[in-house]
Amino acid sequence: MSKILKVFLNAAQLAAVIAVTVLKKTKIYLEWGRGTGKSFILAFFIKEMVKQMPGASFALVGSTYQQILARTLPSTKLGLKKLGLYHGIDYVVGKNGKSLGFKEPIYQPDKWNNIIHFSNGAIFQLVSLDNPDSGRGLNAFGIVADEAALLDPVKLYNNVKTTNRAVEEQFKKCSMLGIQVYASSTPLTKKGKWFTDMEAVANRKPKEYAFIKASALINKLNIRPEWFQEMKDETPSELIYNAEILNIRPKEIQNGFYLQLKPERHYYINYNNDYLESITADYTVNSFNCNQDNDIVKNRPLILSIDWGTFISAVVSQNLPNEYRVLKQFWATQSESSQDHEDLINDFDEYYKPLHNRVVHLYYGHDGNTIRKGTNETYGDELVRILRAKGWTVYDKSKHKPVAPHNDKYILVNMMLKESSSRFKPIRINEQNCPDLTISLERAEAAEGKNGIQKVKKDERNASMKQQHTTHLSDAFDIPVYSLFKSKLKKDTESLDLPTVLG
């Protein structure tokens, strides 16, 4: 006698299932807060797609292959397990399951290291939008995407949606033929606006589209009662709690300090997908080191910039001949001990351990020149000592340097971001390795002060707020940029028309 699996759905999950199975909608957009049950409902749809269409090919989409391995795949496996499908028995990842007696798919993939193969022959190809060839050649019968607000809509259309055209006689009556399911919490940055804009499309075309919004409150029966208060206590800010848990869209910053920051111009993705695909079948957390990055120029020094305070922010960059490239962020909370400070450096060292050229140009804010209590060392001195003990050659670029004026930083950074003068080197930011930094930059406000434009720092003084989405990381970003390029600004000070340059 077969075992009956009982599945209980919350109201949002039930609405999504009804939209597909009863109302026959094939374009599903789920804007759900964290804890609402996205991973489970995506696994539910994956199971139903596999069940309805044995041997069919589908796409499991992520903005990067790294995202798929690190976040999407683990949650998908957990959801499938809850639904009675087990890795190594009902499906395998990164290889052909023929040796286990699995049936072959209708359309054979060119390679198997980016494939989830189910026992009935159905396959999901792991499609990353940072690889222009990732979805090429795929004949898809349906699409599933988690963290959809991170997806590039143009690449999504060209690489994935255009492949969702396959049809076989035996599948023509399947309710999930050609289905597209996109799930995400509400976007925190400008890049995700395409996702929330789909609500208007769904309102215009309700027969085809479903746009379902929900917060974690709808899933209370499946969440510890104290979890909501824990998340509120530990959130970086009220804005983040409202967005991530309650699914309240954040208001756009109108008067930003980084006025000329344009995600489509200044952000990039550049992972080493050959490396990531090589570890698909057998990877650990430690596999996600700098070997996954394709943007490091390995024979040039790293720039490590630190902003001290109640919160320690670190930004890693490289000053290259044709651009200033921001590679990665790190952060930690600060205390009277140096433990958190050392934890951040340990994380930095562990991530970049595969590099043979272990040279660092160290920059830090004025707090780095403060003598640590009970010692004869400044924060900067201690940091140099710790890095050298780990085998890094360190050049201290900020010892005894004065505080940089906010107004000058504002003008310089925006001149560089605007890219209207060849004297100013363009800035490029690895958005996947700097998720908190991009939020910090986009949400940094500006105000008129007695010495010109100033960065609004009020959230840094709120002790109840965790700080990775306030202005700390943006300060760490500013320090080497100003130090390296301020001389370029001085050449323009007499003729600078600020409204023209920044408007």
Image (cartoon, rainbow, N blue to C red):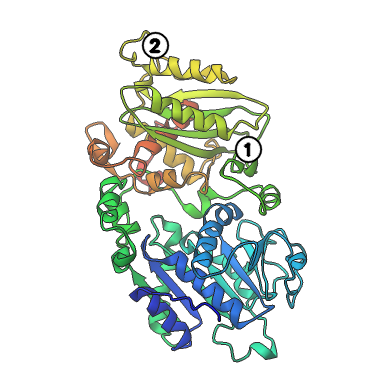
- Disc marking residue 384: none
Q: Which residue is mark 2?
A: 377
401 or 269, which is in the foreground? Answer: 269
Q: Is residue 57 toward the left or the right of residue 501 in the image?
A: right
Few, some or many residues within 10 Å of mark 2 (<14, 14–19, 20+): some
Spot occupied by residue 179 in the image (x, y as percentages of width and height): 55, 79
The amino acid type of the residue labelled 1 equals Ile
Q: Looking at the image, can residue 139 be seen?
A: yes
Few, some or many residues within 10 Å of mark 1 (<14, 14–19, 20+): some
Instruction: State whether residue 402 is above or below residue 8.
Output: above
Where is residue 203, by image quadrant?
bottom left
CA separation in Å, label 1 and label 2: 32 Å
Mark 1 vs 2: CB contact within 8 A: no
Q: Looking at the image, can residue 215 be seen?
A: no
Q: Is residue 411 toward the left or the right of residue 283 in the image?
A: left
Instruction: State whether residue 310 is above or below residue 441.
Output: above
93 or 357, which is in the foreground? Answer: 93
Q: Is residue 134 toward the left or the right of residue 175 in the image?
A: right
Name the residue at 67% across, 90% down. Answer: 170
Name the residue at 39% across, 78% down. Answer: 14
Q: Which residue is mark 1?
A: 296
Spot occupied by residue 382 in the image (x, y as percentages of width and height): 44, 16
